[in-house]
Amino acid sequence: MLSPTHVRMARAGLNWTLKDLEAKTGVNKNTISRYEAGAAILTDTLQKIERAFKAAGVIFIDEDDAHGPGVQLQKMKPEVGQRRDLKDARPKRRSKSSK
């Protein structure tokens, strides 16, 4: 089950604000914030949050006897038309002779 710690860690890993997660799930940001602080929320609400994170490539790691809960981010495959190398996106420098 998705813990409040998982939600905080997943948001941090994806660099998502409460508003970002609200937009992706339809769950009010105040509800998300209360859950992160330890309050209970409905199971279907929690499932919406979990689906959004999984769609973004988050893997949830359950707590065990030796380690606490955690998250891991999958490497996402670039979508069609998406640049693979950002250095190609840099503007070209003009040569001094073309001024």
Image: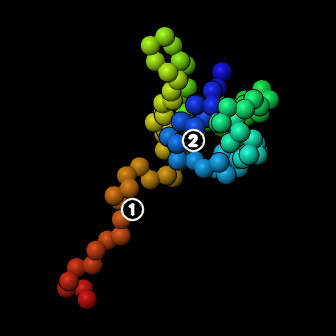
The residue under label 1 is 89
Above/below status of 22 relative to 53: below
| Helix, strand or loop for disc 2 | helix
Residue 83 x, y percent position in the rendering:
44, 53
CA–CA distance between discs 1 and 2?
27 Å
| Helix, strand or loop for disc 1 | helix
Above/below status of 69 relative to 28: above
Along the line of sight, the residue nearer the viewer: 34 or 45: 34
Locate residue 49: give its quadrant.
top right
- Direction from residue 14 to residue 35 in the image, left or right: right
What residue type is disc 2 on? Arg
Above/below status of 18 relative to 43: below
The residue under label 2 is 11
Classify the position of the N terminus by image quarter.
top right
Asked whether residue 17 appears in the rendered view, the answer is: yes
What residue type is disc 1 on? Ala
Locate residue 11: give its quadrant.
top right
Asked whether residue 54 appears in the rendered view, the answer is: no
The residue depicted at 25 percent of the width and 89 percent of the height is: 99
The residue depicted at 72 percent of the width and 47 percent of the height is: 29
Q: Earlier in the sequence, mark 1 or mark 2?
A: 2
Give the residue furthest to the left: 97
1 vs 2, front mark: 2
Residue 6 x, y percent position in the rendering:
58, 30
- Direction from residue 61 to residue 7 in the image, left or right: right
Please, which colouring scheme is shown?
Answer: rainbow
Residue 14 x, y percent position in the rendering:
53, 43
* Mark 1 crowdedness (10 Å alpha carbons): few <14, some 14-19, many ≥20: few
